[in-house]
Image (spheres, rainbow, N blue to C red):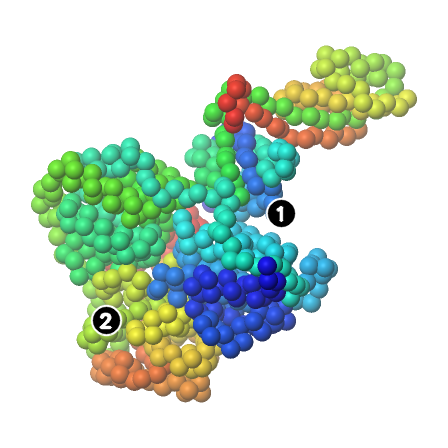
C-alpha cells in the first residue's frame, strides 16, 4: 500500500484577530494539528490601540480543505474575520525580501543591472557585496532570487505575503 | 471597592455562576483556592483519586444535568492528568470548565517544580483557554469561560491561575459579562436553508432523520421538537451513539443506532434514502463507513451549530448553521404554515420492514454461558421494572456497543458514553458524576473487565461520598473489541489483548466498602441483577460472560453500509492493507 497525495491550490487568507497572548500559536497549531500547510505567515497589529492584528497566511489544499481551514479558523474565539483573498479577489499581494549578493567585477555590475530591472533598492554595500531590498509578488521575488543565485547569492530574508482586497471595501 | 484575593474572587464567581459541585484534587499550586473552599457553605468539593477521574466525573455531571462540569486541579501533573478528559469533552462537545493551578508568574518558564506549559498543552484540546496573570482580570475571565463553555457548540475551557495570582488582591465587584467581540456563534438559521429543507422534506419519498448528540446538547426543547418533526413527516429516525435517547427507542419510527455497529435497517435505510436530514450529528467515520459508497442516491440537509462540521466529510445539499432547537422550530413552523401533509411513505416503510425482518441484533445462546447481549437486555428489563430514573454510562469497547444496541433509551441525558475520543476509563467516573448531579436516580456503569481498570481507583470516591452507583462489569477476560478486530483482521493472533492477572472484582469492591456480587452462569443472571439494583449503596458486579463473543452487526473498516457482517460465519479473518490502515 502507498500513501496518495492530493492536488493542491494556493490560497491567500487574511485574518483579523484579537491581539492577545498565544494567538499565533493557536493559529499555527491549528494548521499542524489538522495537517494543513502554511507556505507563509505574517502578523502585525493594525489598530491605534494595538487591539487587533492582521494575519496573512498563504496556504494550499484542494478546495474542500481550504473551506475547512476557513471554517476551523473562524471557530477560534479570538478570530474576528477570515477572508479568502483568492476567492474574494481581485486583491493586491506583496512580499518584501532582503537579498544579499557577493561578487566583484562583471558579476557586481550585472547584479546592479538586474536590480534596476526589478526595481530593487540597494540598502547596504561593501566592496564585495550588496543587500538589495525588493518588494513584489512572491513570483517576482522568486525570479529575482533565482537570477541572483547565478551571480553570487549569499542569503535571503523574506517577510511572507501581505494582501488586501482591491477597491474601497474592507477585506 | 473592597479588595479580594484571587482565590476568593474565583470562589465568589463560581457561586455567582451557580456552581454547586467541583470535582478536584489539591496540590501545591492550588492551596490558596482549596483554603478558600474550606467548609464552603454552598460549593461541594468531590475529592477524586486521580485527576482524569475528575474530568470524566465533570463530564458525567454535565451530560446528565445539562449544567457545566467544573474541575479543579493543581499545576504540572494535575493538569497533564486532566488532558485526556479535556480532550474527551472537546470531541463530545461537553460543557466543562477546568481550573488549573500554575507556578507563580515569576517562575513560569524556569522549569519550576510541578511546572507544565498547561496553556500550550491544552491549546488544541480546549474550546478556549486562558492564563490569568493578574487577579484584577480573574472575574471577567471566569464569567467569559463559563459563557464560552456552555454556548454555541459546548466544550471544555481551561483557566490556568498562577499561585501568586490566587494570593494577590484586587478590587472586586461582580463583573458584567464581557465576551470577545469575535465570539458570536450562529444560533438562528438563515431563512433560505429552512425554506429549502422544508420543501425537500415535503417532496421526499424515502426520507430519514439522522440525529446526533447536538440534539441532546441543544436541550429538552430540541428533543421535543425532534419528536414533533418525526410525527409530522412520518420519517424513520436513526441516531449516532451520542444521540441515543433524543428520540424514544420505544417509538415505531425508531430504527436503532446506525454506523459500524448499527442495525441492518438503519444502515440500509441510510443507504437507500432519497433524503437525509442530519440533525446535530457530524458524519463521523464510524457512521459513514466507506465514504464513496455512503448514501449515494440521497440529497442531504445538515443542521449543525458548528459551521466547520458542515461539508467536512460529506458534502451536503443544504447547510443549516443553527442551534438544533431553533432550526427544528423554524422547520416545523414553516411546514405547518405551508400546509404540508405527511407524504405517503407506505412503500418506504415496507422496505424498512424487510430489513427489520433480518433481526440484525439477534444472537445465539448456548445455555451454559451468559451472552453479553443477554446480560444487557436483562439489565434493561430489570431497570424498567424498578420504575426509577435510570442513567447508564459505559466504558469503551464491545460492552459499550452491546449497551447501545440492547438497552433502550426513551429520554435524553440518560446515556453517557465516550463517543468521539473513545476513552477507556470514562464510564465509571462519569457514573459517579452523574450520581452526584442526580441523587435520586439510579446511576449504572456498564463496563468491561479491561476498561474498568483504567479508573478503578475511583471506587474510593464513591465510598467517601456515599454514592450508590452500580458498576456492572461484563467480564470476558479480554479487551474484547481489540480481540474482535484481531480475529477479523489478523487471523486471530491475539496480541496482548488477553486480560491476564485480573483482580477479584468482588474482593476489590469489598476492600473499598462496596458490595460485591459475582454472576457466573445464565441461571444466576436475573437474580444477580435484581440483587444489584436492590442493594443500597455502591455495588460492583463481576458478570462472567461468554469469552469470545463478537459484536455484530458490524461494518468492517473500508466497507459500505450495504456490506454489513451479521454473524460470525461471514468473517474471513483477513483484511486488505487498505482496510487495515483505516482507523
Residue holding disc 2: B380
- Horizontal and vertical percent for residue B401? 32, 63
Looking at the picture, tell me which residue is in the foreground, B562 or A25: A25
Q: Is residue B176 left or right of residue B161?
A: left
Q: Chain of mark 2?
A: B
Regarding residue B414, the answer to whether it shows in the image is yes
Image vertical order of residue B340 relative to residue B240, above or below: above
Image vertical order of residue B342 relative to residue B243, above or below: above
- Horizontal and vertical percent for residue B196? 25, 34
SS class, disc 2: helix
Circle on res. B182: none
Looking at the picture, tell me which residue is in the foreground, B226 or B179: B179
Q: Is residue B170 left or right of residue B64?
A: right
Tell me which corner region of the image, top left, top right, bottom left or bottom right, holds residue B4: bottom right
SS class, disc 1: loop
Residue, far front: B1
Query: Residue visible at 42% across and 87% down?
Result: B513
Q: Is residue B322 left or right of residue B353?
A: right
Query: Residue visible at 46% across and 62% down?
Result: B16
Query: Residue visible at 25% across and 62% down?
Result: B411
How packed mark 2 is, by other alpha carbons closer than 10 Å (few <14, some 14-19, many 20 or more), is some
Tell me which corner region of the image, top left, top right, bottom left or bottom right, holds residue B115: bottom right
- Horizontal and vertical percent for residue B20? 43, 68
Q: Are marks 2 and 1 on the same chain?
A: no
- Horizontal and vertical percent for residue A154? 79, 28
Circle on res. A21: 1
Q: CA distance from mark 2 to mark 1?
A: 51 Å
Q: Nearer the viewer, mark 2 or mark 1?
A: 1
Regarding residue B127, the answer to whether it shows in the image is no
Image vertical order of residue B414 relative to residue A62, above or below: below
Amino acid at each position: 500500500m502507498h500513501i496518495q497525495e492530493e492536488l493542491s491550490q494556493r490560497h491567500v487568507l487574511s485574518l483579523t484577530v484579537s491581539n492577545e497572548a498565544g494567538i499565533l500559536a493557536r493559529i499555527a497549531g491549528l494548521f499542524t494539528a489538522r495537517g494543513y500547510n502554511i507556505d507563509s505567515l505574517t502578523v502585525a497589529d493594525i489598530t491605534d490601540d494595538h487591539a487587533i492584528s492582521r494575519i496573512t497566511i498563504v496556504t494550499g489544499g484542494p478546495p474542500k480543505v481550504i473551506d475547512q481551514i476557513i471554517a476551523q479558523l473562524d471557530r477560534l474565539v479570538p478570530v474576528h474575520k477570515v477572508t479568502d483573498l483568492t476567492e474574494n479577489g481581485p486583491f493586491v499581494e506583496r512580499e518584501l525580501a532582503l537579498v544579499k549578493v557577493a561578487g566583484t567585477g562583471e558579476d557586481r555590475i550585472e547584479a546592479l543591472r538586474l536590480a534596476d530591472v526589478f526595481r530593487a533598492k540597494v540598502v547596504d554595500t561593501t566592496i564585495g557585496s550588496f543587500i538589495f531590498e525588493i518588494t513584489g509578488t512572491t513570483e517576482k521575488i522568486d525570479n529575482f532570487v533565482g537570477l541572483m543565485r547565478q551571480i553570487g547569492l549569499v542569503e535571503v530574508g523574506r517577510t511572507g505575503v501581505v494582501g488586501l482586497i482591491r477597491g474601497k471595501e474592507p477585506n | 471597592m473592597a479588595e479580594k484575593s484571587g482565590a476568593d474572587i474565583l470562589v465568589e464567581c463560581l457561586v455567582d455562576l451557580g456552581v454547586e459541585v467541583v470535582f478536584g484534587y489539591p496540590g501545591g499550586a492550588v492551596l490558596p483556592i482549596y483554603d478558600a473552599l474550606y467548609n464552603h457553605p454552598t460549593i461541594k468539593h468531590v475529592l477524586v483519586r486521580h485527576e482524569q477521574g475528575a474530568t470524566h466525573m465533570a463530564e458525567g455531571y454535565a451530560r446528565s444535568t445539562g449544567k457545566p462540569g467544573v474541575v479543579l486541579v493543581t499545576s504540572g501533573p494535575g493538569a497533564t492528568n486532566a488532558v485526556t478528559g479535556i480532550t474527551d469533552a472537546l470531541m463530545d462537545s461537553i460543557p466543562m470548565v477546568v481550573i488549573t493551578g500554575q507556578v507563580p508568574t515569576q517562575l513560569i518558564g524556569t522549569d519550576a517544580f510541578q511546572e507544565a506549559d498547561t496553556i500550550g498543552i491544552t491549546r488544541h484540546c480546549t474550546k478556549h483557554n486562558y492564563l490569568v496573570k493578574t487577579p484584577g482580570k480573574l472575574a471577567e475571565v471566569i464569567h467569559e469561560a463559563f459563557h464560552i463553555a456552555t454556548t454555541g457548540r459546548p466544550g471544555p475551557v481551561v483557566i490556568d491561575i498562577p499561585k501568586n495570582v490566587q494570593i494577590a488582591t484586587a478590587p472586586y465587584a461582580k463583573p458584567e459579562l464581557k465576551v470577545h467581540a469575535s465570539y458570536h456563534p450562529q444560533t438562528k438559521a438563515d431563512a433560505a436553508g429552512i425554506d429549502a429543507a422544508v420543501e425537500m422534506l415535503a417532496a421526499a419519498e424515502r426520507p430519514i432523520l439522522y440525529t446526533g448528540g447536538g440534539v441532546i446538547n441543544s436541550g429538552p426543547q430540541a428533543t421535543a421538537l425532534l419528536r414533533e418533526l418525526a410525527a409530522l413527516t412520518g420519517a424513520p429516525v436513526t441516531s449516532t451513539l451520542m444521540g441515543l435517547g433524543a428520540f424514544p427507542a420505544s417509538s415505531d419510527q425508531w430504527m436503532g443506532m446506525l454506523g459500524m455497529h448499527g442495525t441492518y435497517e438503519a444502515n440500509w435505510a441510510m443507504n437507500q434514502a432519497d433524503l437525509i436530514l442530519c440533525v446535530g450529528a457530524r458524519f463521523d467515520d464510524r457512521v459513514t463507513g466507506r465514504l464513496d459508497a455512503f448514501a449515494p442516491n440521497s440529497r442531504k440537509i445538515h443542521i449543525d451549530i458548528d459551521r466547520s462540521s458542515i461539508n467536512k466529510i460529506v458534502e451536503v445539499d443544504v447547510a443549516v448553521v443553527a442551534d438544533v432547537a431553533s432550526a427544528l422550530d423554524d422547520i416545523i413552523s414553516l411546514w405547518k404554515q405551508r400546509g404540508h401533509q405527511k407524504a405517503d411513505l407506505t412503500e418506504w416503510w415496507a422496505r424498512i420492514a424487510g430489513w427489520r425482518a433480518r433481526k440484525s441484533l439477534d444472537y445465539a445462546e448456548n445455555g451454559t454461558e451468559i451472552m453479553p447481549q443477554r446480560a444487557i437486555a436483562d439489565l434493561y428489563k430489570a431497570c424498567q421494572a424498578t420504575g426509577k430514573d435510570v442513567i447508564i454510562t459505559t466504558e469503551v469497547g464491545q460492552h459499550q456497543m452491546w449497551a447501545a444496541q440492547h438497552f433502550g433509551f426513551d429520554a435524553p441525558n440518560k446515556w453517557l458514553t465516550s463517543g468521539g475520543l473513545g476513552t477507556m476509563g470514562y464510564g465509571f467516573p462519569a457514573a459517579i458524576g452523574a450520581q452526584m448531579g442526580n441523587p435520586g436516580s439510579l446511576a449504572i456503569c456498564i463496563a468491561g473487565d479491561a476498561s474498568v481498570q483504567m479508573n478503578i481507583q475511583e471506587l474510593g470516591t464513591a465510598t467517601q461520598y456515599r454514592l450508590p452507583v452500580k458498576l456492572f462489569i461484563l467480564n470476558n477476560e479480554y479487551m474484547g473489541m481489540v480481540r474482535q478486530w484481531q480475529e477479523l483482521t489478523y487471523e486471530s493472533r491475539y496480541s496482548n489483548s488477553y486480560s491476564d492477572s485480573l483482580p477479584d472484582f468482588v474482593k476489590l469492591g469489598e476492600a473499598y466498602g462496596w458490595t460485591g456480587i459475582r454472576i457466573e452462569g445464565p441461571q444466576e443472571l436475573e437474580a444477580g441483577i435484581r440483587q444489584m439494583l436492590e442493594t443500597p449503596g455502591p455495588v460492583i458486579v463481576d458478570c462472567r460472560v461468554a469469552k469470545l463473543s463478537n459484536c455484530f452487526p458490524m461494518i468492517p473498516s473500508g466497507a459500505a453500509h450495504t456490506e454489513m457482517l451479521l454473524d460470525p460465519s461471514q468473517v474471513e479473518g483477513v483484511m486488505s492493507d487498505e482496510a487495515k490502515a483505516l482507523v
